[in-house]
Amino acid sequence: MRKALPVLLVMFFSLSPLCAQTAEEILEKFAKTIEIPTVQGTFTIRLISASGDVREIKARAYQKMKGPVQNNRLFVFDFPPTVRGTGLLLHSYTDNRENDMWIYLPTIKRVKRIALESSGGGYFMGSDFSYQDLINTDYNKMAFERVADQTVYDKDSYVVKAWGKTPEDQQEHGYLHILSYYRKDNYLLHRRDYFVFNGDLLKTYKVEEFLELGPYMYPTVVSMTNVQTKHSSELKIEDVKTAEIPDNYFTTRYLQTN
């Protein structure tokens, strides 16, 4: 038995690197779980201050994959009355093209284009979600590293660290680096930690609930908590459908007529 033990150890250590998944393989499997061709629903964002005050925003949301490198999103806001009729259109890309964002302001009946890259992303309707958090990540501008696995929220998780390849990419991305936690049982991203340029943790994203839609998994209740200000945002999506969405929904003309 003493002679067999070293052989078994050699076999274990020689085989384990071949079985280990790389960060890129984990990301690819995660992408397959969420790349729903079309999805729509209604959502409510609860903005919760450090003192516990709450205000709500309600909107209709539409999302559609346009080929392998483009993802279109449309938000039409219904509540509160001060933003009713406001529309937000996002075209995001993963092939080095600049992302596009337009906002329709019903009070002046105008569509305005906003440059995400030059504006630093901004925050989505005053929530803790930035516009950069909502759009597709251009993996060509990012570096990835698999770090030590962890158990998070009682789920065994792969952990992947991501950061911009250059200082310009980091600035565009908005963070020094991000740690993402993917469940080992289904590759669902269920937590993400965002670190600012001095190395401090800024905010944490958490998936509270998700919906299984055939081969896909769609987060339906998520939260983003700013650990520095203690402000948090809870987003709940309801009436989720995967019916086909016409392409004209994702045009600036539709923003003005819906």
Image (cartoon, rainbow, N blue to C red):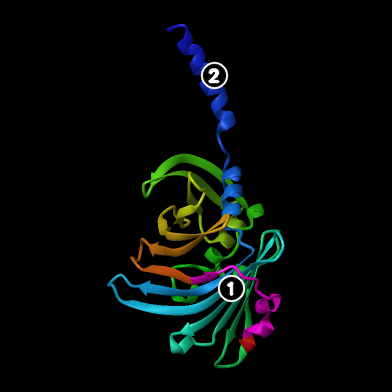
Identify which amino acid the numbered label 1 is placed on: Tyr
Q: Which mark is residue 62?
A: 1
Q: Secondary structure at mark 2?
A: helix
- Residue 154 covered by magenta stretch: no
Residue lying farthest to the bottom in this orientation = 108
Q: Is residue 86 left or right of residue 37?
A: left
Identify which amino acid the numbered label 2 is placed on: Met
Q: Is residue 161 left or right of residue 54?
A: right
Residue at figure coordinates x 48%, y 12% from the top left:
6
Residue 36: x percent and y percent?
A: 61, 61
Mark 2–mark 1 Cα distance, whole angstroms, equals: 51 Å
Numbered range of the magenta stretch: 239-255
Q: Secondary structure at mark 1?
A: strand
Residue lying farthest to the left in this orientation = 51
Residue lying farthest to the front in this orientation = 214
Which quarter of the image is occupied by the N terminus?
A: top left
- Residue 245 covered by magenta stretch: yes
Which quarter of the image is occupied by the C terminus?
A: bottom right
In the figure, 17 relative to 102: above or below?
above
Q: Residues within 10 Å of mark 1 (few under 14, many from 20)?
A: many
Q: Nearer the viewer, residue 235 or 204?
A: 235
In the figure, 118 relative to 170: above or below?
below
Q: How many marks?
A: 2
Asked whether residue 123 is in view, the answer is no
Say which residue label 2 marks: 11
Residue at figure coordinates x 45%, y 12% from the top left:
5
Residue 209: x percent and y percent?
A: 42, 60
Among numbered discs 2 and 1, the one appearing first in the sequence:
2
Q: Residues within 10 Å of mark 2 (few under 14, many from 20)?
A: few
Residue 238: x percent and y percent?
A: 47, 71
